[in-house]
C-alpha cells in the first residue's frame, strides 16, 4: 500500500505538471458530453486480468454536490469462481445486450474542478453486476490492475494506484454496503436489489 501511495502521488504530480486532469483525458474535448454514456465506448478493459472501468455522469439533479461524473470500477467474474453472489443479472440486460461477467467494487466521483471527491458503492441495478459479498471482494481487490489497457496510460495507472492506495477503506466501504443492503432486504426482500430508491449504499471521502 505504501508503494501504491507513492505511485499515486507520483502520477498525480505528473498529471498536474501536464495540466490535464483525468476527466478530459477520458471525455473527448471535440464532442458533446452525453449523460449516462460510457466513456470510453465499450468500457476500458485490461487485456491481462480483465479488470475494467468506465466513466459517466448522471443528470445534474442526481449528482453529488459539485460532481462532474464518476468512474465505475470492476473485477472480472472469473476471479470469483465458487463464490455465491447476493444477486446476479439475467443472460441479457434490459437493453437487449449480453450480460457482462463483472463484479463492481466501487465508484470514484470527480468534481467540476477535475479533482476526486469520494468513493461510493451502489446497488445491483445501477451496474447489473454479479453482486459479491464484501469478504470475497476483500481477498481479490489487490488483483485490480489496468496495466496495458487501451487509452491514456496515466488514467489507467492512476486508477490502479488509487484503488491499491485506498485498499482498506474500499473494503470497509464494501462491508458497510453489505450491512445497509441486508438491513433493507429485511424490509423489502429480494426486491431490494432492483429497487430504484435504494441506490448509494456507502460512501468514503477521497482523503488520507
Image: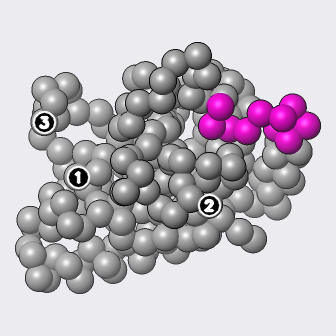
Q: Specify the quadrant of the image occupied by residue 24.
A: top right
Q: Position of residue 62 (x, y in %)?
A: 36, 57
Q: Position of residue 4 (x, y in %)?
A: 78, 53
Can residue 147 be seen here? The reply is: no
Q: Please report contact status of discs 3 and 2: CB closer than 8 Å, yes or no.
A: no
Confirm whether the magenta stretch covers residue 137: no
Secondary element at tag 2:
strand
Tally the numbered discs.
3
**Viewer-closest of 163 and 126:** 126
Q: Is residue 36 left or right of residue 106?
A: left
Q: Is residue 125 left or right of residue 107?
A: left
Q: Which residue is mark 2?
A: 117
Q: Which residue is mark 1?
A: 125
Q: CA distance from mark 3 to mark 1?
A: 10 Å
What secondary structure is the stretch in magenta mostly built from? Answer: helix
Q: Specify the quadrant of the image occupied by residue 208.
A: bottom right
Q: Which mark is residue 94?
A: 3
For the record, the magenta segment spans 15-24
Q: Which residue occupies 29% across, 51% down?
A: 126
| Category of crowding for the residue at label 3, using alpha-carbon neighbours closer than 10 angstroms: few (below 14), some (14–19), many (at least 20) | few
Amino acid at each position: 500500500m505504501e508503494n501504491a501511495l507513492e505511485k499515486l502521488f507520483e502520477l498525480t504530480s505528473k498529471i498536474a505538471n501536464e495540466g490535464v486532469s483525468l476527466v478530459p483525458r477520458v471525455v473527448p474535448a471535440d464532442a458533446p458530453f452525453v449523460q449516462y454514456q460510457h466513456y470510453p465506448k465499450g468500457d476500458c478493459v485490461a487485456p491481462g486480468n480483465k479488470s475494467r472501468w468506465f466513466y459517466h455522469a448522471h443528470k445534474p439533479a442526481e449528482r453529488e454536490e459539485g460532481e462532474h461524473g464518476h468512474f465505475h470500477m470492476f473485477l472480472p467474474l472469473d476471479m470469483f469462481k465458487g463464490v455465491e453472489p447476493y444477486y446476479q443479472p439475467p443472460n441479457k440486460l434490459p437493453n437487449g445486450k449480453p450480460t457482462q461477467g463483472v463484479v463492481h467494487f466501487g465508484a470514484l466521483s470527480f468534481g467540476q474542478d477535475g479533482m476526486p471527491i469520494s468513493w461510493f458503492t451502489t446497488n445491483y441495478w445501477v451496474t447489473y453486476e454479479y453482486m459479491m459479498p464484501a469478504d470475497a471482494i476483500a481477498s481479490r481487490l489487490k488483483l485490480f490492475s489496468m496495466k496495458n489497457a487501451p487509452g491514456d496510460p496515466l488514467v489507467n495507472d492512476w486508477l490502479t494506484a488509487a484503488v491499491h492506495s485506498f485498499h482498506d477503506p474500499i473494503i470497509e466501504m464494501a462491508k458497510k454496503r453489505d450491512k445497509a443492503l441486508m438491513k433493507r432486504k429485511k424490509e423489502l426482500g429480494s426486491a431490494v436489489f432492483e429497487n430504484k430508491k435504494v441506490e448509494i449504499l456507502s460512501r468514503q471521502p477521497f482523503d488520507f
